[in-house]
Amino acid sequence: MRPLFHPRLINSDFGDPILFIPFLLEKRAVLFDLGDIHSLSSRDILKITHVFITHTHIDHFCGFDRLLRLFLGRDKIVYMYGPAGFLKNVEGKLAAYSWNLVDNFSNQFGFYLTEVHSKHLITNLYLCRDKFRPARPAEVKPFNSTLYEEPALSISTVVLDHSIPCLGFSIKEQFHVNIKKDALDSLGLETGPWLHEFKQALFNHRLPDSAFEIKSKKGISGKKKFILGDLAKQIAVITPGQKITYIADVVYNELNAEKIINFSKDSDHLFIEAAFLDKHKNIARTKNHLTARQAGTIAAMAGVKQFTVFHFSPRYAGQANLLHEEAHEAYGTGATS
Ligand SMILES: [Zn+2]
Ligand SMILES: [Zn+2]
């Protein structure tokens, strides 16, 4: 089975934390955190449609300028989400430049920003041609943990404590549709854009007895008609969807740990910060970070299938293995912290 999401941390264990998640066979990606993104190619950056920022400490947000620089002059709205104060943070970034020449731009580049509070969201649109001034008074909407949703997937958040509000994020596929190539061959069907329509029909819960037509490739006339449910039985294997969770910069306390465990429950892959070793847990507490042992314990208690620790303190340069080992030992033994 080829998964839909292909998450990868783009920097080293000691670099700025950024999780890049491209989608299989689609020219799009989402980003969790936006520190130094120079190790990401321009081609990959231009695939990004949605950016989710845990908090605006500089190591999580300093890549904003590179992203803005690459997208300027393009027809695109980039959707960005961040914690309390986020609109002011981005407005401050945008106010740092002179925009007197953008009146002549014919493109529609802009940011659609969402600021996350525990019970509501604040949103606004900032278009380049308006010199990035907010399009209207900010809108306030009720909020129930889902930030973004489309038929195939959703992205949700939880507000955590890092001495300031800090967001955790999960991306979840509704279910996974795997196409059986040999079944296509035996039905005389070729792959093509119709497969995307077919999957969308399933994600949109179209009635199984509805008709589904497959247009032949150009040059060959005719259409093949199927009943959606029959076709699905023949060519598709449907399995539970993937869940990827990202937690960066949180202090260890009972409430935070409980929230993270519930939020990341049964993730296929949990990415979780682990700045310090357990022998330095007092420093971790003062700096509002986790230890590797605490991260591994949380991963075990959440029942995640796989997890990766990252965002190590520079004091462990050359000793990254110690943090990986401590985390995996805690995960293996289900140690309590
Ligand atoms: Zn950080
Ligand atoms: Zn931080």
Image: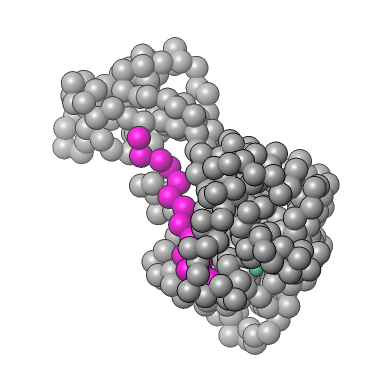
270 left or right, relative to 145: left
For image coordinates 44% across by 27% down, the residue present is: 239
Q: Quadrant of the N terminus?
A: top left
Q: Indicate whether 67 appears above or below 325.
A: below
How many marks overall?
A: 0
214 left or right, relative to 155: left
Residues rendered magenta in the picture: 1-14
Q: Indicate whether 216 appears above or below 137.
A: above
Look at the image and tell me whether residue 200 can be seen: yes
Q: Is residue 11 magenta?
A: yes
Residue 197, image quadrant: top left
Q: Position of residue 199 (x, y in %)?
A: 42, 31
Residues 212 and 205: in front is 205
Look at the image and tell me whether residue 30 can be seen: no
Q: Position of residue 97 (x, y in %)?
A: 64, 85
Q: Residue furthest front?
A: 279
For image coordinates 81% across by 47% down, the residue present is: 255
SS assignment for the magenta stretch, majority: loop
Q: Check the image and tell me how it is coloured.
A: one colour
Residues 174 and 303: in front is 303
Q: Position of residue 223 (x, y in %)?
A: 26, 24
Residues 300 and 31: in front is 300
For image coordinates 45% across by 57% down, the residue present is: 8
For image coordinates 63% across by 63% down, the residue present is: 277
Q: Is residue 31 magenta?
A: no
314 left or right, relative to 263: left
Q: Position of residue 110 (x, y in %)?
A: 60, 66
Residues 68 and 214: in front is 68
